[in-house]
Amino acid sequence: MGKSAKLEFSSKSEKPAEQWGNGLEFLFSCISLSVGLGNIWRFPYIAFQNGGGTFVIPYLIALLVIGRPVYYLEISLGQFTGRGVVKAFDMAPLLKGVAVGQVLATAASITYYSSIMALTLRFLLASFGAELPWSRCWESWGSDCHDGSAQNATGKMSPAQLYFEREILHELPNIDNGLGLPNWQLVACLAVAWFIIGGVLIRGIKSSGKAAYFLGVFPYVVLLILLLRAVTLPGAMDGIIYFFKPQWRELLNPLVWYAAVTQVFFSLAICFGTLITYASYNNFNRNVYNDIVIITTMDSCSSIIAGCITFGILGNLARETGVTDIGSVVKGGAGLAFISYPEAIAKFEYVPQMFAVLFFLMLFVLGIGSTVGMGSCILRVIRDHLGSSRSPPIWMLASGLAVLGFGVSIVYMTPGGQFILNLVDFYGVSFTALILAIGELIAVAWIYGVNRFCSDIKFMMGIETGWYWRLCWRFITPGLMTAVLIYMLLDMSALTYKGVAYPTLAHVFGCFLAAFGLIQLPGWGLYAVYKQRGGSFWQRVRAASKPSDTWGPANVQLEASSI
């Protein structure tokens, strides 16, 4: 940025009420947010659905050219503005609908993430028994269960799978005749989960920042223990080879790339507004470059470790049941983690109950890290919109979010709840997230401008932005995401859950969810144009593409010549 250039920001700045206590709190909070349920719960079942090794290659490519660049962009944007995601898009009011759509996707995500926490808590309570209830076959399961021997096991299910589907979920074969009534035990667990989420949110950023030291480290200890056990199971290497060995023809399948890109979003928690929110509590001059490298590396390692554990266990199940194809040893679905991990834990020779408690406590802790980040994003947007003078106390907002979230999440506690989770995940989150992510890159790299954004980074952190980041932000990342979206739309088939088709009404509901998130783009764009006064329509469009009067750092007074 030359000496003649000038950085001009609004003088209407306000110092945020909360900030991280130190840089480590921010680092560990981002780790607990990014290394969460998206890695341990979602990554294995998405990899399983998309052919194991066939999925890993696109995932790693997407991580390098989409995940890491977008992560750096969002952290820098949030730190620079010191505001939530919607206010951050004052840089390009024409595309503020991107931010609003991301907040809606985050709201949808937090409902079913909390339902996963409820399932986790239910397993955690069951782990305190004299024996693990999924370690043997129950009489009520009849001849559908195999006891671990290869004889007569073909076509049967493991005790862990039957326990999850029949005793925990009471899962329906389809939802043609409705979802059924909620399971009161799961509803009680869901209430506890939301009570904890709400409690952490009430305490604020400083409290969650201190908790992040534990939230960010504890899961790795448990994961390493499970990895050591999983790789020593008979047949485990067959599953791990399946996890890493690609089927090269399937790499041309656009749905695999679509799954890889959206998994990067979930894995790193990008394009949901949460990272921008967390970074907004940073010190303005903090150099986050090293943080980006550390967090994204740890995140990808966590996913690979979780994949090795899951597929190692699936390899063992395949050997026990006499199934030759790892991909057909169990049905897929969001509950895969609640089958494979418990299966491995039940095989521990000594005190398996203790390891079960550790694992499900870890999964619950990961859920707290993920959902608190999502909740913080939603609350920050509300507080930014209302302003410090009109915003209700944080305890009131957090309590309201917890009550509303609990009420909506009860639908997942029904026998058909996993069908709805899969539906909301696809239509309300994954599908819209990809389109909104493209919009985010267009807003920053093309409308606001890469050069101007890099100048802001230099002004803030005192470092030059390399060509790799510039190329990714402007061309590679939005180009790859657009190509994946187009191919996915051309080749998209009707959504199913474990091969079971949805009724027409469910697809109508899903399309409504997607439309509600995406209609924010033209809706807020037209509103931004309408607010401009005078001139032709295209002149008003150009005016709406320029930063608003409130754009600029919120936590420092700045109207200075460039450095």
Image (cartoon, rainbow, N blue to C red):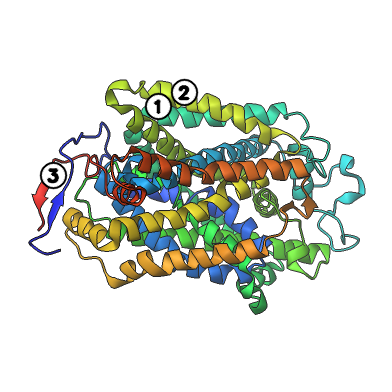
- Asked if disc 2 and disc 1 are in contact, CB closer than 8 Å, the reply is yes
Q: Quadrant of the C terminus?
A: bottom left
Q: Residues within 10 Å of mark 1 (few under 14, many from 20)?
A: some
| Number of the label disc, if any, that sits on residue 558 | 3
Q: Amino acid at mark 3?
A: Leu
Pointer 1: what residue? 202
Residue 475 percent coordinates (x, y): 39, 69
- Asked if disc 1 and disc 3 are in contact, CB closer than 8 Å, the reply is no
Pointer 2: what residue? 399
Q: CA distance from mark 2 to mark 1?
A: 8 Å
Q: CA distance from mark 1 to mark 3?
A: 32 Å
Q: Amino acid at mark 1?
A: Ile
Q: Is residue 473 left or right of residue 560?
A: right
Q: In the rendered image, which quarter is residue 247 located in?
A: bottom right
Residue 408 percent coordinates (x, y): 60, 30
Q: Residues within 10 Å of mark 2 (few under 14, many from 20)?
A: some
Task: Establish if 173 lies above or below 195.
Answer: below
Q: CA distance from mark 2 to mark 3?
A: 36 Å
Residue at 41% over, 36% down: 376
Q: Earlier in the sequence, mark 1 or mark 3?
A: 1
Residue 120 percent coordinates (x, y): 61, 40
Helix, strand or loop at label 1? It is helix
Q: Earlier in the sequence, mark 2 or mark 1?
A: 1
Helix, strand or loop at label 3? It is loop
Q: Quadrant of the N terminus?
A: bottom left
